[in-house]
Image (cartoon, rainbow, N blue to C red):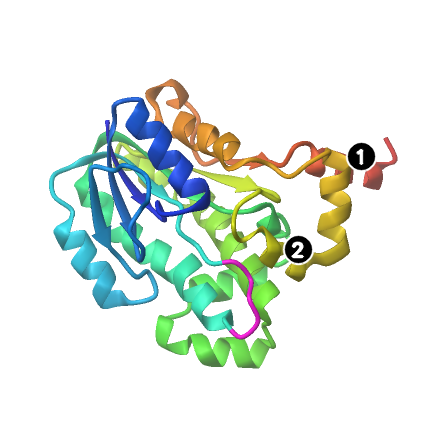
Amino acid sequence: MRVALTGGSSGIGAEVARKLTELGHEVTAFDISEPQVPVSRWIETDLSDPASIRFAIEAAAGRFDALLNNAGLPPRDGLEELVLKVNWFGLRSFMAGMLDKLEPGSAIVNTASRAGAMWRENLDEVRALMALEPDGLADFIQQRGIDATRAYNLSKEAVIVMTMAETESMVARDLRMNSVSPAAVSTGILKDFAAAFGDRMARNVARAGRPGLPEEVADVIIFLASPESGWIKGQDITIDGGMSAMSVSDKLEL
């Protein structure tokens, strides 16, 4: 299997690259930083820069059997615009440019987040973002008072909604697309999420017993990229050690 992977240099992406390579698959990593795990090829890619995205797509040789849109930035104060550029606009633009490079029957897996779980309640703002042109992003953020945490959550809400909304168009292309929504995962950016979500995240992790491991999320991504998951389409798979179930159970007094 030939796999195109964004964000392969650290965290979940590095585990995906490592596991795929160990399984004998060919991995082309698209990342701003060079992966420290073995990959078949690294194409330097800045998903906040449309020119870099265009170059990366042109440089991607041959055709692929899976596209894993994993790259993303965590919520950090002052980076609201950059978070939305990378996590939403960059992901969407890169994916659009790669579609014609995917073999029939290929899988697309988008890394979203449990932080995007409120997409139903925020659907008007999600739709507004999805309809927005990139050059209007700064005004959009200012007018709506979007801070770094909201920028991150909104970007992941949009990824989940897009994954569902594009299911039929992907089926028409003989492609299938799903997303994964991890909760707290023990990577180098876990501290950013602890700062953004505070006591709420700490309580959820305590109830689950521990944060997730990047290799646990990687296993689900790889399964969704494989033929064995061929009838799973348009789904968002939550990977959170039971946190969502506990939250729903509390609300419903189960």
Amino acid beneath label 2: Ala
Residues 163 and 72: in front is: 72
Label 1, label 2: how far apart the Cα atoms are: 23 Å
Residue 77 forms part of the magenta stretch? yes
**Quarter containing the C terminus:** top right
Please indicate, yes or no, whether residue 177 appears anywhere in the rendered image: no
Residues 233 and 145: in front is: 145
Classify 10 Å Cα crowding around label 1: few (below 14), some (14-19), many (20 and above). few
Above-or-below relation of 24 to 191? above
Q: Which residue is mark 1?
A: 249
Q: Secondary structure at mark 1?
A: helix
Name the disc covering residue 194, or none: 2
Amino acid beneath label 1: Ser
Question: Which residue occupies 44% across, 26% down?
Answer: 232
First to last magenta residue range: 74-78
- The tally of labels here is 2
Above-or-below relation of 104 to 79? above
Please indicate, yes or no, whether residue 59 appears anywhere in the rendered image: yes
Q: Secondary structure at mark 2?
A: helix
Question: Which residue occupies 41% across, 29% down?
Answer: 224
Magenta span: helix, strand or loop, mainly?
loop
Q: How far from the left and from the top, in percent, is residue 17?
A: 34, 36
- Indicate left or right for 11 with 9 as reference: right
**Quarter containing the N terminus:** top left
Q: Quadrant of residue 123?
A: bottom right
Q: How far from the left and from the top, in percent, is residue 52?
A: 23, 63
First-in-chain label (1 vs 2): 2
